[in-house]
Amino acid sequence: MNTDERDSIPQPESEEITVPVIEEQIVAGARAVKTGSVRVDKHVETHLRQVELPLLHEDVDVKRVAVNRVVKEAPPVRKNGDTLIVPVVEEQLVVSKRLVLKEEIHVTKRRRRERFVQEVEVEKERAEVQRLDASGRIVNSARDRSVLDRPVRRRTASE
């Protein structure tokens, strides 16, 4: 065989051939999808309520009691029950100086109770819950039946 004939005969190639082996795998997962929502509206209602509570008052009676008695020194302030006795003295010039108890002031404290009524504003909150679908349309509208009364602002008897 000549050289030309050798070139025309197919020769086995010495290169390697790689055949890929493929395996498919499954990856599972979850993602959030909006299917609906809820809207809550809060309404405040104001009501007038009457509040009644006892208040304590103290009144003072002042009575002047004439004594006109000569004393050696000024008597101290003293108490007789609920009455506070405050001596009032003056110096009189005679031949000699002497203290004369001119009068006493009797101060008596009395307590009395009276009923006090005042109208006070109280507020009550009410919640309205609306269920919405995925596109934001109202599915149902139900008012929450469990309403909690909660005073928002308290006023004292001095207001």
Image (spheres, helix red, strand yellow):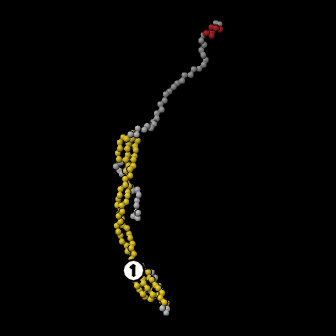
Looking at this view, name the residue that lies furthest to the right.
3
Estimate the x, y position of residue 40 in percent, counting from the top left: 40, 46
Label 1: which residue?
Answer: 63
Q: Residues within 10 Å of mark 1 (few under 14, many from 20)?
A: few
Residue type, mark 1 in image: Lys
Residue 34 against residue 86 in the figure, above or below: above
* Quarter occupied by the C terminus: bottom left
Could you tell me which residue is drawn at 40 percent across and 38 percent down? 135
- Give whichever of 137, 96 is nearer the camera: 96
Q: Residue 58: percent from the left, percent from the top?
A: 39, 72
x and y, in percent, of residue 3 in the image: 65, 8
Which residue reaches farthest bottom? Answer: 95
Q: Which residue appears farthest toward the front when viewing the image? A: 93
Instruction: Mark yes or no: residue 80 visible.
Output: no
The residue under the point 37% across, 53% down is 45
Q: Is residue 126 left or right of residue 76?
A: left
- Location of residue 31 with respect to 11 vertically, above or below: below
Viewer can see residue 39: yes
Figure check: 108 above or below 27: below
Quadrant in the picture for residue 141: top left
SS class, disc 1: strand
Q: Where, quadrant-wise, is the N terminus in this rendering?
A: top right
Eyeballing the image, is 55 above or below 27? below
Q: Residue at x 35, y 42 (%)?
A: 140
Residue in front for this viewpoint, 84 or 104: 104
* Total residue callouts: 1
Q: Position of residue 113 (x, y in %)?
A: 35, 70
Residue at position x 38%, y 42% in the image: 131
